[in-house]
Every structure is written in structure tokens, then in C-alpha cells.
Image (cartoon, rainbow, N blue to C red):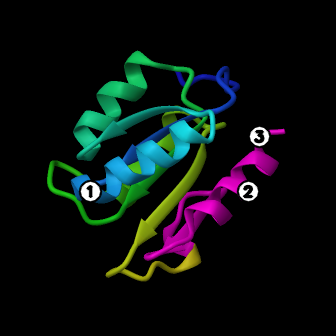
């Protein structure tokens, strides 16, 4: 049974197999006062989510190695952790609205992390 409401407020999980991009985003969100978790693939992300139910936001890349890609991860998260705020990013795979989970936002790469932060700060209030 999934959680019914988010517990953590400023918590984010960043899922991307590109280490430099992932580490830059981790540093950016930590500097903005967020508690940040990171994963290099969907399998690692699921392990983190199952162990830390306080994660409020997930930002995932689409194309990653592992058993599932970021889009399938986002659908899993929506089903298992319904209140999670989802952002799905890709620089290679444009996604149609009907491919996204309900209440998910697509971010074409490169994206402005400052703009994303402003959107998140508004969304979690």
C-alpha cells in the first residue's frame, strides 16, 4: 500500500546516470536548503524511496541503465507514492503528455535549476 500523503517538505531525490549533472544538482539543492538524495539508476532510486518515505520530490532522467528507465520509474512512483511531485527530464527523448504519469512535469534538457527551484518552492507550500 502506498503512502497517502507526503511527510517531508523540502526533500528531493535526483535520479540521473550522468554523475557531473547529478552532483551539480545535488549541490544546488543542498545550497538552497533542501535535503537531497541521489541515485544513478531506477533500481537504486526505488531502494532509496522504499527506505526513506519522506521524499517529497523526484527529478529523474528518462534514459538510464538498469532494469527500467526513468519514465517507467515515474509511473512506479506515481502508483506507489501518489503524492510525490514528479519531474521527468530528457535531452534526447521528447515525451508526449499521454506518456507521462498523472501530475508529472516534463523538463527538456538543459533546464534552468533556478526556475525549477522556484516552481518547487511554490508547489510545496
Residue at position x 57%, y 21% in the image: 54
State the SS at label 1.
Answer: helix
Q: CA distance from mark 3 to mark 2?
A: 10 Å
The residue range painted magenta reads 98-125
Which badge, 1 or 2, comes first in the chain's sequence? 1
Q: Residues within 10 Å of mark 3 (few under 14, many from 20)?
A: few
State the SS at label 3.
Answer: loop
Say if residue 76 shows up in the picture.
Answer: no
Instruction: Kindly identify which numbered label has been placed on residue 124.
Output: 3
Q: Residues within 10 Å of mark 2 (few under 14, many from 20)?
A: few
State the SS at label 2.
Answer: helix
**Do the CB atoms of the residues marked 1 and 2 lie less than 8 Å apart?**
no
Say if residue 109 shows up in the picture.
Answer: yes
**Do the CB atoms of the residues marked 3 and 1 lie less than 8 Å apart?**
no
Q: Residue 71's x, y, as percent? A: 39, 60
- Which residue was labeled with disc 2? 118
Q: Residue 70's x, y, as percent? A: 34, 57
Q: Residue 78: within the magenta?
A: no
Residue 96 sits above or below residue 33 on the image: below
Residue at position x 26%, y 66% in the image: 63
Which badge, 3 or 1, comes first in the chain's sequence? 1
Q: Quadrant of the C terminus?
A: top right
Residue at position x 62%, y 41% in the image: 32
Q: Residue furthest top?
A: 51
Task: Give 99 or 118, whichever is nearer the viewer.
Answer: 118
Q: Residues within 10 Å of mark 1 (few under 14, many from 20)?
A: few
- Which residue was labeled with disc 1? 20
Amino acid at each position: 500500500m502506498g503512502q497517502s500523503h507526503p511527510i517531508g517538505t523540502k526533500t528531493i531525490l535526483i535520479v540521473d546516470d550522468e554523475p557531473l549533472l547529478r552532483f551539480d544538482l545535488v549541490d544546488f539543492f543542498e545550497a538552497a536548503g533542501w535535503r537531497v538524495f541521489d541515485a544513478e539508476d531506477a533500481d537504486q532510486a526505488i531502494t532509496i524511496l522504499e527506505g526513506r518515505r519522506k521524499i517529497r520530490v523526484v527529478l529523474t532522467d528518462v534514459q538510464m541503465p538498469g532494469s527500467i528507465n526513468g519514465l517507467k520509474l515515474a509511473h512506479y512512483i506515481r502508483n506507489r507514492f501518489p503524492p510525490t511531485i514528479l519531474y521527468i527530464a530528457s535531452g534526447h527523448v521528447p515525451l508526449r503528455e499521454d506518456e507521462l504519469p498523472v501530475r508529472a512535469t516534463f523538463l527538456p534538457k538543459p533546464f534552468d535549476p533556478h526556475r525549477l527551484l522556484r516552481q518547487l518552492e511554490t508547489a510545496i507550500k
